[in-house]
Amino acid sequence: MKDFKKYDIWKLSHVFTLKIYDATKSYPKDEIYGLVSQIRRASSSIPTNISEGCGRDSDAEFNRFLTIALGSASEVEYQLILSKDLNYINETSFINLTEEINIIKRKIYSLKQKLK
């Protein structure tokens, strides 16, 4: 069993999730059960799956959970595009959050390669 809190990718994705929660506070109230819920769920799924993978018995199982985390990161990336296009976030926030999610995606992919 691995300690997920020692992984930089877990730390980055946790901080990113906190930023998503903060950013979505200003979304329209009618999106609370729509886009707000989806992007929050997808972003929190990243560190959640890293954590769960660390609790598994093998690198192969950990790798599977990293694959799920990577899928969630891609989902967040699209939801950020949608948020920008709907004018729920400004261009600066969009650029910053998109850069962060792409760093997270690259780091997850890199960790997956090391586990093979």
Image: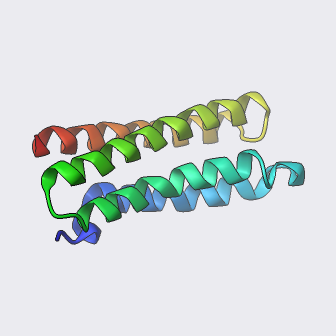
Tell me where residue 111 sits by quadrant: top left
Q: Residue at x 18, y 69 (%)?
A: 2
Is residue 109 depicted above or below 8 in this figure? above
Is residue 80 depicted above or below 64 in this figure? above
Q: Quadrant of the C terminus?
A: top left
Image spot of residue 88 (x, y percent): 77, 41
Q: In the rendered view, does 57 fall on the left or right side of 41? A: left
Tell me where residue 62 sits by quadrant: bottom left
Q: Nearer the viewer, residue 31 or 99?
A: 31
Is residue 2 depicted above or below 93 in this figure? below
Image spot of residue 60 (x, y percent): 16, 48
Q: Nearer the viewer, residue 67 or 114?
A: 67
Q: Residue at x 14, y 58 (%)?
A: 58
Tell me where residue 40 sits by quadrant: bottom right
Q: Residue at x 33, y 64 (%)?
A: 51
Image spot of residue 23 (x, y percent): 67, 53
Image spot of residue 84 (x, y percent): 70, 32
Q: In the rendered view, does 92 fall on the left or right side of 57? A: right
Q: Nearer the viewer, residue 80 or 63?
A: 63
Q: How many marks?
A: 0
Q: In the rendered view, does 57 fall on the left or right side of 71? A: left
Q: In the rendered view, does 38 fall on the left or right side of 29? A: left
Q: Quadrant of the N terminus?
A: bottom left
Is residue 96 depicted above or below 8 in this figure? above
